[in-house]
Image (cartoon, helix red, strand yellow):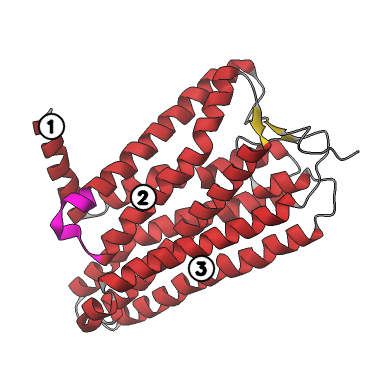
Amino acid sequence: MKARNMSVFSEFLLLGLTEDPALQSIIFSLFLSMYLVTILGNLLIILAVSSDSHLHTPMYFFLSNLSLADICISTTTIPQMLVNIQRKRKAISYTGCLSQVCFVLIFAGLENFLLTAMAYDRYAAICHPLRYTAIMNPCLCVLLVLFSFSISTVDALLHILMVLRLSFCADLEIPHFFCELDQVIVLACSDTLINNILIYVTAGIFAGVPLFGIIFSYIHIVSSVLRMPSSGGMHKAFSTCGSHLSVVSLFYGTIFGVYISSAVTDSHRNAAVASVMYSVVPQMLNPFIYSLRNRDMKEALRKLMGRITSLL
């Protein structure tokens, strides 16, 4: 196919999860509900952490930033889909599509690094309890968040700059509900070898290294816990890691599931449905995981709801 100048042909078409008109209203209601639950749940986590002085600790500082990243990821993808369904127009501008790719990469990468920082926090708390305050000082916590955001931004901008050099064809249909990097690259008419190599290299570095850090931290955590003399101490140590392990399993499990499903099936529609599992579901469930499994968080949320009710 003949490449088109993007100044002339400047739109992508987001085909969404289905083209069946009868299912559009159901999908709209489902995603709107999931989006509202995600925003409300993560916003409550942020407000609870900021309003309760007992939660002004490194673990909850990282958790509030994780909730903010979850809000940003969902806001980057779902509203555009809802607007397209309502307008029955599937187009997204070239600039809007690349912006969506960029922000998804930034906030997904930020979430990835924050989970690693939280694993390091648990490692310091359990393996070096007497030095925990000195190790996880406020300055280090802020630097870890800024470093995570900076690295994720550099990674996203690098991919976007490589996409900008590509020429695109006339058929710019993306079988997805948002602009995903690999789906955009597939539509290019020019050579995409460098782009694909870059995806694998950056995935190995920016996903593999944090995952290795999490595994390394928990190997030391398990080793330290097993050396504890009392079963009560072991239970308390593992309970503080339970929520984080659940979120890590959900985050990486859904990502690996998406790529495995993409490898074993040729259906773009099935791959789009599978992508919901990493781009929507974890962000919605994270607040429930931390609030239901954490006594301090439940108490802070109870106090927050009491304050909100008294104001109303």
Q: Which residue is mark 3?
A: 211
Q: Pointers 1 and 2 in contact (CB under 8 A)?
A: no
- Specify the quadrant of the image occupied by residue 201: bottom right
Q: Which residue is mark 2?
A: 67
Quarter of the C terminus within the rendering: top left
In screen coordinates, is 134 left or right of 247? Answer: left
Whether residue 153 is visible here, answered yes or no, is: yes
**Magenta span covers which residues?**
48-57
Q: Position of residue 28 (x, y in %)?
A: 51, 24
Above or below residue 19? Residue 133 is below
**Pointer 3 local density, CA inside 10 Å: few below 14, some 14–19, many at least 20:** many
In screen coordinates, is 303 left or right of 66? Answer: left
In screen coordinates, is 302 left or right of 35? Answer: left
Q: Position of residue 148 (x, y in %)?
A: 45, 64
* Badge 1 or badge 3: first in the primary sequence: 3
Quarter of the N terminus within the rendering: top right
Helix, strand, or loop for circle 1? helix
Per the model, the C-alpha gap separating discs 1 and 2 is 23 Å
